[in-house]
Image: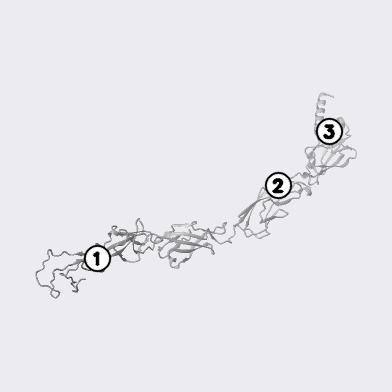
């Protein structure tokens, strides 16, 4: 054997050894170049890679070829290696055999070995299908839009997956919706998602979930499904709040000073359509104040156009309505409770234009003189201050209008029989409004003064004469005075030491004194 032949032999031998690393051939046959042969091989599991068939008895000088048989494309998966030194030829797979490729031939691989005389040895290799393929969806994701009023039991969307395995035992696919499963949908056997119960756009505007395709083995695939709900105009508008509380200062016009819990706003109940809203006032209570309010039809802002007097009305109820711009029958109602905020626009009022009282001149400090009533039409009534003018007057007045003696030493009827004063009420220390009432206090007398004798002539002269009871002589007149008034000022005279020479009598009555 020459050097070149030796090298070639080694190369062929190495290739042979490499191809046989997968084990023995599936079958061994004797090459028949006389009449040919037909033979079925296997079955063998798909994925096999290695020697398919070994032919023995290949005579030297015999030209053997691997040719197609019935299916021309099949021989592309095979190759023939000829070993003349041991009279064999072996058919090998070029790569792992896949039964799913041979669907048209029912998982059979066809080939033939042709001798130089054109006699053929025809072969059919049976392949066992294995579950070696995962289902594949025909889309990376599924998306659809459905109307809110789609009828129950309607088909929503169909997903589809295929399995390359050729055996029905391995390519049959079961579809399911993965957890969490939306209660509105269910899956049928063919991948159709069906509406199970009515949709509500206001509850859910769309759904996102995963669908699984699983074969009868353990192989599966998933795909995302998005279902968008198209809103239908079946809802009335709604206010964010059913009751609003607003404040407006009395005697003012314009927008509310405040409104709680938020600004007035209504929306279309069909949020996916969101038709514009038209606002209006449906009623005002008391109805006399209907003309005092307007509402902007677009913004819903309420304006007071005629000022309100809190002393006439402290609270007004405004009923408002929101209507859908394209359907006036679709409406919503809300109530705005308007509080008229008080401002100091009313002066205090005394319950009398003037007060008169009498007290004894010996009344002690703290003695009650009278009570003056004060009211204020503003909210909260009168909570201001009261004072007596002048401040030097011997009287005080408490916040509830009680007038008391504060300086009894200044009460002396003989000096000041009557006090003419003023009572002033002020409702606020800053820019307050005030009222004034006359206060006249008369001081009543008490017997607090001693009688006084008026001066007598000095000396008292008596002429000589013969005097008797029948012929008396008026020596002089004794007079008295008392600063007290009325009965308190009456003086009674009496003799402390009677005398036989003199007699005293009352001037007015002429009766002798005892």
Q: Is residue 495 left or right of residue 191?
A: left
Q: Compared to 258, does 49 lie above or below? A: above
Q: Nearer the viewer, mark 2 or mark 1?
A: 1
Q: Secondary structure at mark 3?
A: strand
Q: Is residue 146 left or right of residue 291?
A: right
At horizontal 84% and vertical 40% (from top left) the residue drawn is 112
**Residue 195 in which image quadrant:** bottom right
Quarter of the rendering occupied by the C terminus: bottom left
Q: Nearer the viewer, mark 2 or mark 3?
A: 2
Q: Which residue is mark 3?
A: 82
Crowd around label 3: few <14 · some 14–19 · many ≥20 (10 Å): some
Q: Compared to 86, does 441 lie above or below? A: below
Q: Secondary structure at mark 1?
A: loop
Looking at the image, the residue that sits furthest to the left is 464
- Residue 370, horizontal then vertical, whole percent: 34, 64
Q: Which residue is mark 1?
A: 484
């Amino acid at each position: 054997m020459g050097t070149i032949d030796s090298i070639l032999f080694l190369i062929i031998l190495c290739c042979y050894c490499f191809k046989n690393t997968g084990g023995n051939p599936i079958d061994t046959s004797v090459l028949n170049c006389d009449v040919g042969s037909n033979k079925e091989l296997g079955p063998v599991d798909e994925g096999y890679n290695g020697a398919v068939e070994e032919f023995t008895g290949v005579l030297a000088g015999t030209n053997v070829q691997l040719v197609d048989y019935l299916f021309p494309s099949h021989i592309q998966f095979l190759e023939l290696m000829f070993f003349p030194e041991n009279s064999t030829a072996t058919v090998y797979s070029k790569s792992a055999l896949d039964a799913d490729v041979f669907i048209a031939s029912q998982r059979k691989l066809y080939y033939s070995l042709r001798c130089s005389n054109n006699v053929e040895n025809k072969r059919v290799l049976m392949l066992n299908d294995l579950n070696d393929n995962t289902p594949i969806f025909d889309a990376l994701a599924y998306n659809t839009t459905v109307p809110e009023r789609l009828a129950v039991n309607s088909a929503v969307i169909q997903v589809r997956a295929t399995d390359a395995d050729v055996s029905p035992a391995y390519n049959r696919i079961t579809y399911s919706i993965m957890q969490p499963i939306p209660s509105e949908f269910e899956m049928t056997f063919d991948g159709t998602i069906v509406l199970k119960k009515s949709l509500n756009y206001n509850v859910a505007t769309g759904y996102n979930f995963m669908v699984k395709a699983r074969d009868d083995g353990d192989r599966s695939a998933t795909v995302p499904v998005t279902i968008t709900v198209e809103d239908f105009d079946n809802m009335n508008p709604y206010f964010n709040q059913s009751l609003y509380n607003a404040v407006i200062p009395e005697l003012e016009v314009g927008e509310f000073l405040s409104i709680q819990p938020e600004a007035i706003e209504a929306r279309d109940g069909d949020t996916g359509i969101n038709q514009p809203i038209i606002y209006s006032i449906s009623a005002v209570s008391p109805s006399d104040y209907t003309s005092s309010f307007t509402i902007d039809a677009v913004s819903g802002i309420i304006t007071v156009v005629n000022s309100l007097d809190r002393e006439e009305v402290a609270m007004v109820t405004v009923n408002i309505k929101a209507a859908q711009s394209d359907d006036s029958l679709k409406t919503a109602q809300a109530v705005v409770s308007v509080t008229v905020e008080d401002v100091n626009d009313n002066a205090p009022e005394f319950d009398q234009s003037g007060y008169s009282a009498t007290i004894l001149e010996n009344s002690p400090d703290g003695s009650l003189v009278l009570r003056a009533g004060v009211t204020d039409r503003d909210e909260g009534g009168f909570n201001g201050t009261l004072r007596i003018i002048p401040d030097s007057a011997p009287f005080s007045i408490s916040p509830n209008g009680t007038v008391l003696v504060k300086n009894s030493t200044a009460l002396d009827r003989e000096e000041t029989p009557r006090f003419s004063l003023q009572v002033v009420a002020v409702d606020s220390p800053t820019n307050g409004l005030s009222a004034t009432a006359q206060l006249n206090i008369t001081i009543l007398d008490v017997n607090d003064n001693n009688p006084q004798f008026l001066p007598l002539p000095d000396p008292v002269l008596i002429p000589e004469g013969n005097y008797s009871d029948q012929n008396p002589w008026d020596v002089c007149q004794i007079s008295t005075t008392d600063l007290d008034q009325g009965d308190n000022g009456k003086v009674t005279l009496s003799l402390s030491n009677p005398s036989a020479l003199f007699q005293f009598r009352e001037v007015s009555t002429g009766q002798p004194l005892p």
